[in-house]
Amino acid sequence: MKNNFSLSKAREYFHIPVSGPDLDILRITNQEMKSIFDSVGASVLKLVKDQVDKSGTLFKAVIIVGRFGESCYLKEYMQDKLQSGIKVLQLPHSENYAVHGALKLGLSQVDEHG
């Protein structure tokens, strides 16, 4: 569901299966979903902007990875909020890149400490 949420393809409601004594479907409006995604998008955007600012380099593109990096909404949100001229790119199966990066970091720390 989170990968398919998009303002450009807005739906009136999202139906989310849940387990509960009196509830089996949770209905969330598009606006409620947007408010959830906006808070997470703002956090991701801050992390990206901080990294861009610290680098002192002019970027032409930012690649977002991981499961949330596959989100249509995150791409739209970041493209709207980043400086013009910086493209937001998504890679297919990007969760693999996040795992690969985590493994490389972990292995480098093992190598350093023997």
Image (cartoon, rainbow, N blue to C red):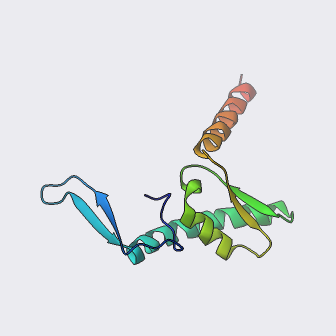
Q: Which residue lies most toward the top here?
A: 114
Q: Is residue 66 above or below residue 23?
A: above
Residue 90: x percent and y percent?
66, 55
Give the quadrant of residue 13. bottom left
- Which residue is painted at 37% across and 75% down in the image? 12
Position of residue 19 measured from the top left corner of the image (x, y, whole percent):
21, 52
The residue nearer to you, when weighing 74 against 108, is 74
Q: Residue at x 63, y 39 (%)?
A: 102
Image height check: is 29 above or below 22? below
- Compared to 88, does 29 lie above or below? below
- Judge from the rendering whether residue 109 lies leftward or rightward of residue 5; answer left or right: right
Please give the name of the residue rendered at 44% of the width and 69% of the height, measured from the top-left corner: 36
Q: Is residue 17 left or right of residue 65?
A: left
Q: Residue furthest left?
A: 22
13 left or right of 100 in image:
left
Image coordinates for residue 59, horizontal then vertical, percent:
82, 63
Q: Residue at x 41, y 72 (%)?
A: 11
Instruction: Look at the image and tell me in which quarter the C terminus lies.
Output: top right
Image quarter hosting the N terminus: bottom left
Q: Nearer the viewer, residue 84 or 10?
A: 10
Residue 44 location, quadrant: bottom right
